[in-house]
Image: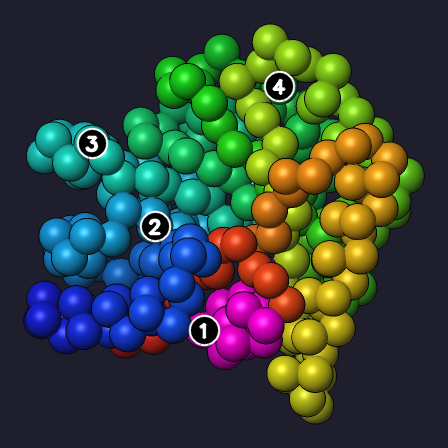
Amino acid sequence: MQKNEIEIRLKKLKAELKKVELIAVSKYSEIEDVVRAYECGQLSFGENRVSDLEIKAEYFKNNNLNDVKWHFIGHLQSNKARELLKIPGLYAIHSVDSLRLLEELLKKEHEFKGSELKIFFQINTSHENEKSGFESMDELKKAVQLLLTRTDSKLKIEGLMTMGAIRTEDVKASALKSFRDLKAIREQLSITFGLSHLKLSMGMSGDYKEALAEGADYIRIGSLIFK
C-alpha cells in the first residue's frame, strides 16, 4: 500500500477513536506496510503468531525503530511463552486465557528484558468453542489474585479482553452483549479486589463502533488500515 493511503486511514480512525488506544493489527501485513504505518506515527501494533512477531520485532530493532509497542493478541500456547517473552519491544499480552498460562508466563518471566509487561485476561464472553478464554469466574479470580500477590513481578495486570461472537445472525447485537458482559466482569473484579483501573480491550474492524459505545480503552483494527 501507498504510505499516504495508510496515513489517511489512520488519521480517520484516530479522529473517531479520540483517546482510545488504537492497536494496528499487522498480522497479515508485509513489514514494509507496518513500517509505513509507523512512519505515520502509529506505534502500537498487534500480532497473533509468535513467529511472525519475532520477525517483525527483530526487523524494527535492527533498524533502530525502538519506540514501537508490540501487542500479542493471538492464542498463546504454553510452550511458546519463553519465545514470546524474549521478543524485543513486547509491550502487552492481550490473550492470557487460563490460570495455567499465567503460571507458565510467571515461570519464564526472567526471559523478558523490558521493565513492565501489561497483561490482559481474555474472557470468552460469547461462550463459543472456537475461542479461548476464561469462562469460570472462580478461575479468573484465582489468576487475578496470583498476579496481584506477585508484587515483584514485571507482569502487571492491565485489563480484560474479549471478542464478539463468530457464529451469530446479528454481529452488532452479539458484539454489544459480549462487550457489556466484559464490563460486568470488570465491575465484579473491581469490587472483589479494589481494582479501579482495569482497561477493556475489545472491538475490531467489524464492531469497533459498538466497542467505542461501551467504553473500550484499546481497540484492535487491521483490515481498515492495511487492506
Where does residue 178 sit, x and y in percent of width and height? 72, 67
| Tag of residue 191 | none
**Label 2, label 1: how many angstroms apart (C-alpha)?**
14 Å
**Label 1, label 3: how many angstroms apart (C-alpha)?**
27 Å
At label 2, which amino acid type do we have? Phe
Q: Residue at x 81, y 31 (%)?
A: 193
**Label 4, label 1: how many angstroms apart (C-alpha)?**
32 Å
| Tag of residue 106 | 4
Q: Earlier in the sequence, mark 4 or mark 2?
A: 2
Quarter holding residue 130: bottom right
Determine the residue located farthest toward the bottom in the rendered image. Answer: 169
Q: How is the image coloured?
A: rainbow
Image side of residue 104 versus residue 180, left or right: left
| Tag of residue 205 | 1
| Quarter of the C terminus within the rendering | bottom left
> Along the line of sight, which residue is nearer the eye, 91 or 183?
183
**Label 2, label 3: how many angstroms apart (C-alpha)?**
13 Å
> Along the line of sight, which residue is nearer the eye, 137 or 185?
185
Q: Is residue 211 magenta?
A: yes
Where does residue 98 sit, x and y in percent of width and height? 73, 38
Kindly report which numbered mark, 4 or 3, lies closer to the viewer in this rendering: 3
Mark 2, residue position: 45
Where does residue 115 sit, x and y in percent of width and height? 41, 18
Q: Residue at x 44, y 31 (%)?
A: 84
Classed neighbour count for the residue bearing mark 4: other residues with Cα under 10 Å, few (<14), some (14–19), many (≥20): some
Range of magenta residues? 202-213
Which element carries disc 2, helix, strand or loop?
Answer: strand
